[in-house]
Image: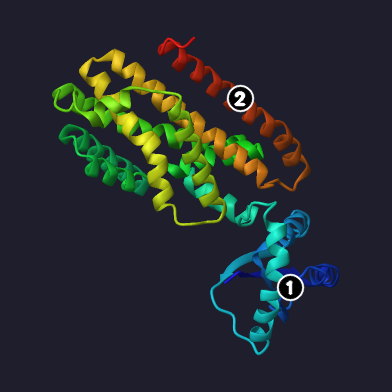
Amino acid sequence: MNLQLIEVYIPDQHFESINDKLQKYDHRSYWVSSESEERMLVRILVKKREVEEILNYLEEVSNVVEGFETLLIPVHTYLAKNTIHDEAKEEEKKKDEAEKEKAHLLRSSRHELMNAVEKNSHITMNYSLLILLSAIVATVGFLKDSEAVVIGAMVIAPMIGPVIAIAFSAILGDYKLLGKSVITSVYGVAIILIISIAFGYFTDIGMQNDQYLDRTKVTIVDIFLGVAAGAAGALAFLNRLSGNLVGVMVAVALLPPSVALGMSIGHGAFASAYGAFLLVTVNIMSILLAAVTIFSISGIRPVRWEEVQRANVSRPLAIVFVIVIVLLLAAFILIGHGVI
């Protein structure tokens, strides 16, 4: 359903003013109960598109009010006498709303997205094991020249999370989170390189097949692949969609060339290593370019004044920095192909 439940625990001395303010927001249902002798509980059932505005207000209040707590709960089913009539009214509104929504990117609330980014920026045992297994499977796929095995490795690889977290934290100007996301992403690529370097050092099998050779060459077209992967990943993240298919798309741009880079280094084929390294860098920067652009268009903004000031500086810097890097990489590609 397109509904979410906000639970707010309000100290008694602040209840009247906060309750009056909350009732002014659009809502489907509104309940008030006594949680204890010191606090009141307010439950607000609202549409998803109304959530962020309410949470922004509650975030401001929580900074100055002690004992104030807020919970956001997804609603999968809501039944009431008036739901059938409301559904009919909703159908009538859809045409008008559809025109408005064309101009905006639909997304979850900033608070939900921030929690997901926090989760994706941490190095966990599951993340480490999935990266390790995907690196082994992908390298074996290279050795066997099996496209199916390489695709299987891309399904396993959880490479979308940290890269999206880098773009998201850069847009918000959260440099601490940005640092953690970069470390997590580099950590994942490092595991892939270690595994593939070991395979490349001990065997030269797979060094002449198509799976390997295709990932040691880079063209301008690869920039478009990276941008498409980044845009798809950012849109899936904004709407909290299943990341499996999009994860494969991002892994297409990151996992195979990383494996090719490691195998080239292990085998001492440094000319091929340069091509693979350039391809990895092009793909990462292209993905980031698309992601920071999508997040900027989506209207994600912090609330607190100091965070707003930081984001206003970080956002244009992030976009300009990534564009400059992508243009430089494009120049290297064209020079390598003798175009310029």
Tag 2 and tag 1, C-beta contact below 8 Å:
no
**Residue 281 picture location, percent across and down:** 44, 25
Please name the residue that numbered disc 2 is placed on: 321
Q: Is residue 279 above or below residue 114?
A: above
Count of numbered circles on the image: 2
In the picture, residue 90 is in which quadrant?
bottom right
Front-most of residues 45 and 146? 146
Mark 2 Cα shell of 10 Å, populated few (<14), some (14-19), many (≥20):
few
Q: Amino acid at mark 1?
A: His
Q: Secondary structure at mark 2?
A: helix
Residue at position x 38%, y 40% in the image = 251
Query: Sequence-wise, which precedes: disc 2 or disc 1?
Result: 1
Spot occupied by residue 18 in the image (x, y as percentages of width and height): 81, 67
**Left or right: where 29 falls relative to 75:** right
Residue 68 visible in this rendered orientation of the protein: no
- On screen, residue 11 versus residue 148, left or right, reads right
Examine the rendered structure and indicate whether residue 75 appears above or below residue 290.
below
Farthest residue in the bottom direction?
Answer: 81
**Viewport quadrant of the N terminus:** bottom right
Residue 5 in the image: x percent, y percent? 63, 71
Residue 27: assigned label: 1
Rendering quarter of residue 280: top left
The image quarter containing residue 338 is top left
Q: Residue at x 21, y 27 (%)?
A: 198
> In the rendered structure, which amino acid carries the disc numbered 2?
Phe
Residue 248 in sight from this viewpoint: yes
